[in-house]
């Protein structure tokens, strides 16, 4: 029982952190992007990646070693829908990550460089798509955890 409780707590904590770092990115990218904001976006993206890894690792550990056991989770479609959504969010997040890296390099090369507005809007749109897709994952989790898809 303790193992299940600890794994659940760690999984929820990583999910909250993931949403926190993703939300910070969504807020930061909406405003004027000066050098310090661009560097902060890069740092938040690294933390976002770390929290995504923690979500995946704790979710796997919870499915395998949790109270319900792997048969409960892996026998229905919701786990695969969750993983598909998670993968989609991860794939979409590659573009903003590469953009943040490029922006930082442009600033390192030319401190007067400014982010083009269309590029900023496109990157924000991708981050918002990530937020909305990620928000569907808990819905599928509820369906899964209640055994509604059996």
Image (cartoon, rainbow, N blue to C red):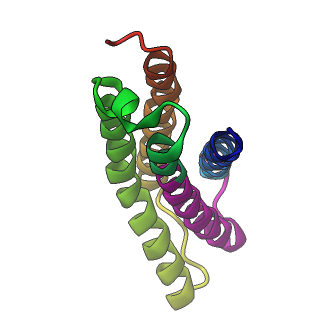
> For the view shown, which residue lies furthest in the bottom direction?
109
- Taken as a whole, is the magenta stretch helix, strand or loop? helix
- Give the residues drawn in magenta, as a range: 30-57
* Camera-nearest residue between 30 and 82: 82
Residue 113: which quarter of the image? bottom right
What residue do we see at 63% from left, 62% from top?
44
**4 horizontally vs 103: left or right:** right
> For the view shown, which residue lies furthest in the front direction?
1
Q: Position of residue 104 (x, y in %)?
A: 53, 77
* Camera-nearest residue between 114 and 13: 13
Give the answer, above or below, for where 68 lies relative to 22. Answer: above
Give the answer, above or below, for where 112 lies relative to 130. Answer: below
Give the answer, above or below, for where 10 lies relative to 125. Answer: below
Q: Position of residue 143 (x, y in %)?
A: 45, 16
Q: How many numbered discs, if any? A: 0
* Magenta-drawn stretch contains 54: yes
Q: Position of residue 2 (x, y in %)?
A: 71, 43
What residue do we see at 64% from left, 52% from top?
21
Residue 125: which quarter of the image? top left
**Picture quarter with the N terminus:** top right
What residue do we see at 55% from left, 57% from top?
54
Q: Position of residue 55 (x, y in %)?
A: 53, 50
What residue do we see at 39% from left, 27% from top?
72
**18 horizontally vs 60: left or right:** right
* Magenta-drawn stretch contains 3: no
Give the answer, above or below, for where 48 lies relative to 13. Answer: below
**Picture quarter with the C terminus:** top left
């Amino acid at each position: 029982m303790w193992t299940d409780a600890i794994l659940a707590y760690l999984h929820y904590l990583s999910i909250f952190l993931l949403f926190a770092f993703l939300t910070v990115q969504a807020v930061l990218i909406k405003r004027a992007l000066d050098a310090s904001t661009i560097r902060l976006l890069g740092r938040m993206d690294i933390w976002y990646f770390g929290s995504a890894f923690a979500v995946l690792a704790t979710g796997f550990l919870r499915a395998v070693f949790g109270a319900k056991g792997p048969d409960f989770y892996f026998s229905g479609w919701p786990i695969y829908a969750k993983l598909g959504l998670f993968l989609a969010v991860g794939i979409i997040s590659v573009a903003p990550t590469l953009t943040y890296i490029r922006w930082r390099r442009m600033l390192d090369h030319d401190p007067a460089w400014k982010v083009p507005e269309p590029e900023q809007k496109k990157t924000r749109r991708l981050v918002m798509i990530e937020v909305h897709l990620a928000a569907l994952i808990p819905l599928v989790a509820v369906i899964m955890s209640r055994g509604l898809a059996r």
